[in-house]
Image (cartoon, rainbow, N blue to C red):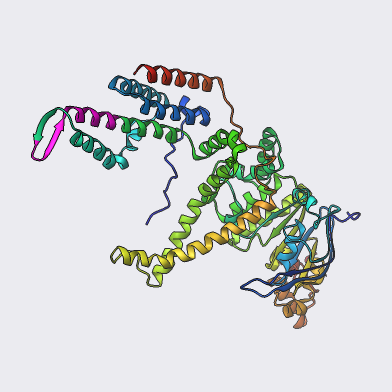
Amino acid sequence: MKGQPLIRFSNVNFTYAKTQTRDGWQALKDVNLEIYEHEFVAVLGRNGSGKSTLAKHVNALLTPSSGQVLVAGLDTSIPEHVWEIRQKVGMVFQNPDNQLVATTVEEDVAFGPENLGIPSAEIHRRVTEALEAVGMLQYRLHPPHRLSGGQKQRVAIAGIVSMRPKCIVLDEPTAMLDPAGRQEVMQTIHRLNKEEGITVLHITHHMDEVIGADRVLVMDQGRIVLEGTPREVFSQAELLRELHLDVPQITDLGQRLRKRGLAVPQGILTVNEMVMHLCPSD
Amino acid sequence: MRFRNLTIGQHIPGNSVVHRLDPRTKILGTTLLIVLLFAVDGFIGYALAALAIAAVVHLSELPWRYVLRGLRPLLVILLLTVGLNVFLTEGEVIFRLWFLTVTREGLVRGLMMGTRLVLLIMGTSMLTLTTSPIQLTDGIETLLGPFRRIGVPAHELAMMMTIALRFIPTLLEETEKIMKAQMARGADFQSGGLMQRAKNLIPLLVPLFVSAFRRADELAIAMEARGYRGGQGRTKFRELRFQRIDAVAMGLSIIFTVVVGILF
């Protein structure tokens, strides 16, 4: 798995310029980060922690004020690299309504490949493939405004998949969805990561959504303050609480039980694990 | 207010010969028809044009009432045109009715203008009835393509039309939501005079505009993130293809327009 990282942040700082309505502020402070191919990395942090800013650096929507971001060896600060980088890193945003361009699902999925100048016949093949990958093929002729939030977000993901990127960055893709929609989207992302081998950088503030990740980064005030497997990160319940983040309910329950003297290990992540520890069967 | 069942344009899907024609053929054919209707002068010419339109309607397999429905919103203009022409043209008097004078010339002119308008409306609604907005956009984009060199932003216009079509339902839904929210807080959109009502719309329009601008901003970022950089080097998912039937339809329209236009 290791080798050359797909994405590398070295000493990245980013300051938003002062505008008429807002003071300037530093959103990223000395961020160092490496993401490897096929990894599923989740980024946690409360509002204003810099996680969205981090996401926008990966496909050159923003470029560092100082430091360097390399995507597949390409420096995002060099304008000539931008289009190649956007081909390699796709981005899904929070509001599903504001990222769909076309009047039907299949045309929206075709938008990216059209921009890349891919011949029509190949676009048709990719659109079918991408819609199949997110389970939306039967909706290909629907207008986007007739779909549910979760479905729209899956179409947005298909619109990225059809560009055949190496990495998808999802900036709080479930923030505006109901629980069913969230689940749909999470399943889709995990499947793309496992089956298609697409690297995923998932930005969220829902603790439950990071459980399946290979690695979790916790951000606060522009810095990466904690990094590790979900289990390692959630073992630091005190620190997370200081950062105004919650641990998943089940992890929290485990901690409370341990405080009361039960033999429950640190960092339990799923109900099944909890059951295994509380009622070990032989 | 009910926005849910709103359909944009008046396209009625189908699989007839007319539906399957390339949108470019249909746009050009309609243009020829408009030219023809202004070129001919005399009832034989109009009768022939009417026959041609009737043939197209028949081929489109659309019920006549759909085609005639397009006339309804323009009924007032139609009556006004006919009326003004009938009563205000000077010439050989047929009869007088109080202060109104009907002349032979007026009657002929009024009828001609009326027929011309009716045929114009029916002809152009055949275009919008059988062609989806997307196809129309594609057709307009390719037809304007050659004029790009003299500065016609063909791709940009088509993109704007597509985005407008995509966001009209979204914005209508939002309007409905804001209206309900403001009504829940005591806003009144129904009573009062015209000025008062217009004023009452302010709490609706301000949030709607703010949100539309925010949407536009986010959409622009999303489009850029998906590699959009204008029409340069872009390919099309749906390629328009001229088929033999388009050539036939085009040929027939041109011959018909030229012959009828010259003879009548």
**Which sits in the foreground, B81 or B195?**
B81
Figure quadrant of the N terminus of chain A: bottom right
Residue that extends furthest to the right in the rendered view of this protein: A3
Read off the magenta span: B97-115
User: Does residue B254 show up magenta in the picture?
Assistant: no
Residue that extends furthest to the left in the rendered view of this protein: B98
Q: Is residue A251 above or below residue B32?
A: below
Residue A256 in sight here:
no
Q: Which residue is pictured at 39% across the width and 35% down the height? A: B125
**Which sits in the foreground, B63 or B27?**
B27
User: Does residue B110 show up magenta in the picture?
Assistant: yes
Residue A89 drawn at (x, y percent): 75, 52
Figure quadrant of the C terminus of chain A: bottom right
Relative to residue B254, is residue A176 drawn left or right?
right
Count the marks.
Answer: 0
**Which sits in the foreground, B7 or A73?**
A73
Q: Is residue B78 above or below residue A154?
A: above
Q: Is residue A247 above or below residue A261?
A: above
Relative to residue A229, is residue B53 drawn left or right?
left
